Amino acid sequence: RNWEHCTHLPDQLAAQRKEIDAVLEPFLLSPETLREVKNKMRTELEYGLKRETQGSATVKMLPTYVCGTPDGTEKGKFLALDLGGTNFRVLLVKIRSGRRKSVRMYNKIFAIPLEIMQGTGEELFDHIVHCIADFLEYMGIKGARLPLGFTFSFPCKQASIDKGTLVGWTKGFKATDCEGEDVVDMLREAIKRRNEFDLDIVAVVNDTVGTMMTCGYEDPNCEIGLIAGTGSNVCYMEDMKNIEIVEGNEGKMCINTEWGGFGDNGCIDNIRTEYDKEVDEGSLNPGKQRYEKMTSGMYLGEIVRQILIDLTKRGLLFRGQISESLRKRGIFETKFLSQIESDRLALLQVRQILQQLGLDSTCEDSIIVKEVCGAVSRRAAQLCGAGLAAIVEKKRENRGVEHLQITVGVDGTLYKLHPHFSRVLQETVKELAPWCDVTFMLSEDGSGKGAALITAVAKRLRNIDKYLYAMRLSDETLIDIMARFRREMKNGLSRDFNPTATVKMLPTFVRSIPDGSEKGDFIALDLGGSYFRILRVKVSHEKKQTVQMESEIYNTPEDIMHGSGTRLFDHVAECLGDFMEKQQIKDKKLPVGFTFSFPCRQSKLDEGVLITWTKRFKASGVEGADVVKLLNRAIKKRGDYDADIMAVVNDTVGTMMTCGFDDQRCEVGLIIGTGTNACYMEEMRHIDLVEGDEGRMCINTEWGAFGDDGSLEDIRTEFDREIDRGSLNPGKQLFEKMVSGLYMGELVRLILVKMAKEGLLFEGRITPELLTKGKFETKHVSAIEKSKEGLSKAKDILTRLGVEPSHEDCVAVQHVCTIVSFRSANLVAATLGAILCQLRDNKGVGRLRTTVGVDGSLYKMHPQYARRLHKTTRRLVPDSDVRFLLSESGSGKGAAMVTAVAYRLADPLLLAALRGQRKGRGLRRRCFSPATV
Ligand code: BG6
Ligand code: BG6
Ligand code: GLC
Ligand code: GLC
């Protein structure tokens, strides 16, 4: 026959035509079938994301720890490896940011012989390192320890960006001893074995992810990466709140779907043909990657070969002769498939190609082969399109829009070289996802560029980590700090060491928590926290003890906090007068409990000598004086009302009493607010400073001063020192300054300034606002760490500081906040842990069961703080059942409880009775009651 005229099968072959059509019929997928595939894929995607179903899901939906697409601020010089596609490449990628942003790349392709792909893991990684060495030599950069991004195009379980455990080999690889291992470790070890150069492996990424990032660099709307090459796979940006297996709800993370495994549970077996099964059985991973085996370049040629064999057997091809060549697995590579299907190719050329492959064909044979190729590749493109339609539909739902515009970054030889694949794929997506306007963007530069971009971001985040390394405290360190604090407590309690002890362990003369018998009408003052509050507390006793409270907040301007003591107490007396006026009790002399949240030395309940101001206060002439006397004097001076100050209590004590009212087990009071401190019930026999050995007394530890003797220098950072220098009380309350709310925002600000100066943030921009002390507040830290809106809050807050933060900046700042607030919670867990151990030892029990009453704005307002504190505390003191009880009503209620008891004990008859009861002892005790309750 004349090849020029050979375009279709001649009429005499009409009978065979039918048989051929019958063979190819299962490859024709109806729109309904495709829609079904899309829906099944959609179901599988959801399974893979859910914690419960994830284990058995065939579409693995692997988190990648890539949380954003490129924003143009990436920069630096990186090495990239690209392993798993048709070619193994080593690249050098130079990225410039800013207005002249650009990426320059140099690369070299290396062969990976079959025996290495399927040899041992060690051989494979040694070979990779050998190729890297060759490349470094070739580029003349062997000495530089460059950061490396590793595109590893196989399914990996990741727990961070720089770790990836190979789930299972796919495609043409089957090296031993790799599955279940961390491929980054394997690469690192191979580099060590070679001992010629060193590299800093920063990120491991799938090729889909690399591709999405490569395209995302040009088009910010690119949130999907597709590979249609040797293998088939997709990744996309998923909302964190939908990814159940990764903690956190904020922002997005790229998910490597590994959709190649779709159908491994048999859910698409209805469309798999005998030929597909044949191909699967002959593959390196039978039963696995069923969808990939119907859609990707590595397998399409094989499917074609199986069909050709069948047609030959039926006598429809090659004169019924199965040649040696046709028996050879893998002869039809994607590139031949692509060539054969080219419209531009005359049949004669098809025949030539077949001849190259060792297949001697007639004109009719060539037509049939071309048809078979067409059916197989068309089905592949349609199936791939159905899968992709499921992904874009999901994106559309996530965004909650009717009409989605999105870009898909694509790479892979099948997509790039095949004459029809991309068109059919696109048509199918359009058909199945009509509400989505999908732009397909071909990745021109391979995934290496994207991997380098990811490496740039990861390195920056890691730099922050490294930068703030000193703020991450290991459990080992925390246990050490716990032991140190335990020693401090001991010193503070001992007569000999107390004078020089930094942790003062102040006796409070409060001897027990409320017992339910308290009653009366009281006033409570609450000074020293974020607010100055005055309260009226009525405790009644009809049937059940009930408490009724009314309160008023008063302003305390800074000039009063920092002025003279006289003025400060005049102010307090004035506010009290105003309150009594409002309550219409100016003519009464109600007992007053004074919560004064500063370190006071007490020798009885109604006396408190201020040792030193802390936090925001620094009024002159008060340190060394009894604050009860100062307040009494100020009230007398006014002469318009009278008050009976019966007790002065620290806020920790007030909090313990408030919580003790609800929970009898409460024996610790904890404040994490403007300042930080704790009190607890200590055995009298351990308190040298107060006579008597029986029973217990509450000790106000004043742990804020922990470290003032240099005992925390090893964990203090330059930022802590800077905070201290700029504070009202340099050299004092060093623990408090690492922990509490008055300092936390400022701590973060100082870190941000330094990072910006070093170009790690905001592209190095520093604004006057950012440089202003106090502009970044602790409430901002709380807002930024919110799991839902944290990143958008970060953006607002930073924008108000005048910096124009990129998404990556926001992520980085959130990271800084987390590190600083986490450190605070960890430190409190350590000191609290010491108190808990002391209680446990005092009681001589194996397991401590107790309640900690807690108050303070940081503990209350910060979204993660309490949870972290509880968790670390329980880890540090495992032999305990600790209940953390939030004080809902402030320390005023507790102060009233103390006052109630003091008031009752002040009754002369009762006093006498008590004295009589404790014959002999009362006289010896320097200050028996009403000074103690
Ligand atoms: C390349 C990417 O361009 O495409 C690789 O750089 C990727 O990372 C590959 O694996 C996929 O296509 P193929 O056809 O080579 O498997
Ligand atoms: C309040 C207490 O609830 O919390 C105060 O009533 C205490 O006594 C305060 O000082 C501590 O938290 P902050 O955040 O106000 O310092
Ligand atoms: C295989 C791999 C997958 C990769 C894809 C494309 O499906 O399992 O990780 O992305 O091939 O190369
Ligand atoms: C400061 C005070 C302390 C108080 C704490 C919490 O540390 O010195 O007395 O308990 O702040 O308010």
Image: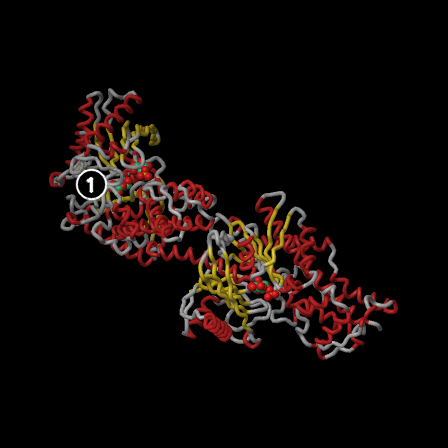
- Image side of residue 786 versus residue 636, left or right: right
- Choose between 337 and 914: the one closer to the eye: 337
Q: Quadrant of the N terminus?
A: bottom right
Q: In which quarter of the image is the C terminus?
A: top left
- Image side of residue 817 versus residue 619, left or right: right
Tell me where residue 7 appears, x and y as whole percent: 81, 66
Q: In this view, does 89 lie above or below 602?
A: below
Disc 1: CA contacts within 10 A as few (<14), some (14-19) or many (>=20): some
Q: Is residue 690 above or below residue 454?
A: above
- Choose between 11 and 621: the one closer to the eye: 11
Q: Does residue 454 appear in this view?
A: yes
Tell me where residue 706 appears, x and y as whole percent: 24, 49
Ligand 3, what quadrant?
bottom right
Q: Splitting the image into 4 quarters, where does residue 359 fall?
A: bottom right
Tell me where residue 622 appears, x and y as whole percent: 18, 35
Q: Splitting the image into 4 quarters, where does residue 418 fall?
A: bottom right
Q: What colouring method underlies this structural image? A: secondary structure
Q: How many marks?
A: 1
Which residue matches tag 1? 612
Q: Tell me the kind of residue under disc 1.
A: Thr
- Image side of residue 721 versus residue 51, left or right: left
Q: Is mark 1 within 8 Å of ligand 4?
A: yes
- Choose between 629 and 151: the one closer to the eye: 151
Q: Does residue 853 appear in this view?
A: no
The single residue placed furthest to the right in the displayed view is: 12
Q: Splitting the image into 4 quarters, where does residue 565 fall?
A: top left
- The residue shown at (33%, 29%) is 549
Tell me where residue 709 appears, x and y as whole percent: 20, 51
